[in-house]
Amino acid sequence: MPEPYWPKKKGSYTLADAARNSSHARLRCRYCKTERWYLVEELVEAFGSIECDDLVYGRRWRCRKCGMEDTIEMSLENPPAANLQEIRLRRLDGIVNIRRVLWRDE
């Protein structure tokens, strides 16, 4: 008798789950050691409720300082109040949709 099919993403930890836990996302470049802090609620607004691992590895983020690809690592943290005063958060300013036109010859 064949095995039943089970969804592979069942019970995955999404950004919406992390937003319910009121956590912050720390993205750090392994190459130049730059840290950036984001609010998880704003990441959900920008990218949707995707799996947390897919945010960095699926989108192929590039470091703004050194320009290297695939060196960004993400961790979800809930820092204490003393550390929240020292952290500089990157806030969502706006979302721009780019519309591109593709042509083909017939």
Image (cartoon, rainbow, N blue to C red):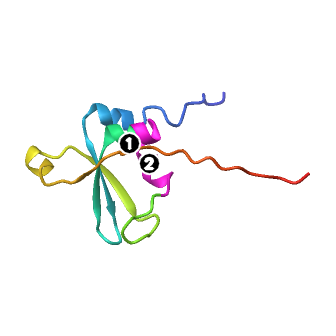
In the picture shown, does residue 20 fall above or below 29? above
Point out which mark residue 55 bears: 2
Q: Amino acid at mark 1?
A: Leu
Q: In x, y percent, where is residue 19?
A: 31, 35
The residue at the point 44 percent across, 35 percent down is 49
Gap between marks 1 and 2, in whole Å? 9 Å
Res. 14 visible in picture: no
The residue at the point 29 percent across, 57 percent down is 36
Asked if residue 65 lies in the magenta stretch, the reply is no
| Element under disc 2 | helix
In the picture shown, does residue 82 fall above or below 30? above
The residue wearing badge 1 is: 43
Residue 9 vs residue 20, the one in the foreground = 20
Residue 17 vs residue 91, the one in the foreground = 91
Q: Residue furthest left?
A: 82
The answer to whether marks 1 and 2 mark residues whose Cβ atoms lie closer than 8 Å is: yes
Res. 33 visible in picture: yes
Quadrant of the rendered image containing residue 14: top left
The residue at the point 20 percent across, 43 percent down is 78
Q: Amino acid at mark 2?
A: Leu
Left or right: 17 in relation to 62: left
Q: Which residues are magenta?
A: 45-60
Asked if residue 57 lies in the magenta stretch, the reply is yes
